[in-house]
Image (spheres, rainbow, N blue to C red):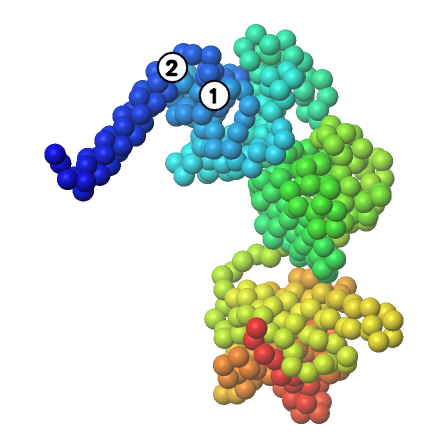
Amino acid sequence: MRNPVYRRKLMKKLRLFGLLAMTLVLGFVFLGCDGSAELAEPLVLRDTIGGRTVEITISRTDPESARSADYTVRNRDFYVIRYVAGDVISRGRISNVSGNTFKFTPSPDSPCDGIEFEGTRNNDNNTVSASIPLPGGGFANAVFRASGSTQTDTGPGGGPGPGPGGDSTPTWSVPAGLRGTWLAYMQKWTISGTTILNETIHGSYEGTIVNHRADGSGAGYITIRYTRVDIESAAVGKYYVIHYKNLADTTVYISGALGVEFGTGAGGKDTRAEAEATYTVANNYFEIYNTLNKLISTGPQNHPLAGTWESDNEIAMSDYRLVITGETVNLIVVTDLSVWGMGITIEDRFTGQIVNVRTTDAGGYLTLRYLAAGEANLNRYGVLYWQDLEGSKVRIVVAATNATAWGGQSRDTQEQAETDFVLTASVGNLRPEWLQPFTRQ
């Protein structure tokens, strides 16, 4: 008779073998389910773009295979968008599913520069709507539906368009000259081919661009779908419109729809069609425009001040914060008046592009072109001076009319500013007695 130790080892091996056998059987049963009612064919829908049929396939497994899932779009589903009997437009995975909306997130090898874009699934009429990037640039507003569907398509602006087989989806793109970083007093706009971000000290908003409509020379409407709204989170997912005009190489006039939203990024409409029909110049939603100056990168300047600096002392009851990069200097002034029952005020005083760096034995000068500042200094030149830089400590002053009005003095040209704004005791606009101690955060 075997000893007890041997029997325990034998039973353990048998149990492991049984588990392995069960796993193999279950796996075989699962793999043998091909064609059963538990799995559906891939979701395959089509639309016509530029006279060519475009097909979208969404599936649970590799999109090139015949096996797939039900028609509910889920995170990590595979997708392929391609011209029928032609090239692939985009391929990757579904992500960020929220209700009927989701994102197409391209794989690294996807065409069209790997641009991520948004889709909407309508289960009632079995369609998927998306503004898809095109290989030649720009986007197309597409409504993909099953072959043979008789649903009415939506044309530009969400109005009725031709049905299946018609070319209901004209292409659009954000003008190249509008893309980039734009600055204005107390705000910053970042515009790409697919997104817009508007940042202000009072709150910011961001959205995916879903349409662009020209409105004459150098003007147009941009429709976004909110992905972030600081002051009203309930607006996320709604549609909003921005209007621009007088687009030039380095300037543009821009306005977010006002009305009850006051241009802060709040509100919005439930559908793109409603937003585009409501937020128009004719309906007086765009009456206040900001003049934006384009940040044209010349590459980072070589200086030692990169970082965020906080003033060690209060300057006229205010704390000064300097955010300095290789290309820009931003001054934010925070004043606490709560002792007088007035709360805290925040002033985004200026943003200047660094156009020159000059060093001295004690420190150096940054010459700034004010891209965002008060009207009197906009697009003019000022100077920041620093000295006694040791580790995280430094002393700084900016050309001003007095010790606290930093950024209040400027000149028409860089040469004038560099000639006039030189550290000089007791006279001029850049005085050593105005130097303030700062600590790098």
SS class of the residue under badge 2?
loop
Tell me if residue 437 can be seen. yes
Q: Residues within 10 Å of mark 2 (few under 14, many from 20)?
A: some
Q: Is residue 15 left or right of residue 30?
A: left
Q: Amino acid at mark 1?
A: Ala
SS class of the residue under badge 1?
loop
List the single residue furthest toward the front. 1
At 37% from the left and 20% from the top, the residue drawn is 30
Q: Are marks 1 and 2 in contact (CB under 8 Å)?
A: no
Please tell me in which quadrant of the rendered image residue 337 appears. bottom right
List the single residue furthest toward the bottom. 425
| Sequence order check, earlier mark of 1 and 2 | 2
> Residue 188: x percent and y percent?
66, 55
Q: How many marks?
A: 2
**Where the N terminus falls, by quadrant?**
top left
Q: Alpha-carbon distance for marks 1 and 2? A: 11 Å
- On the image, numbered disc 2 is attached to which residue? 34
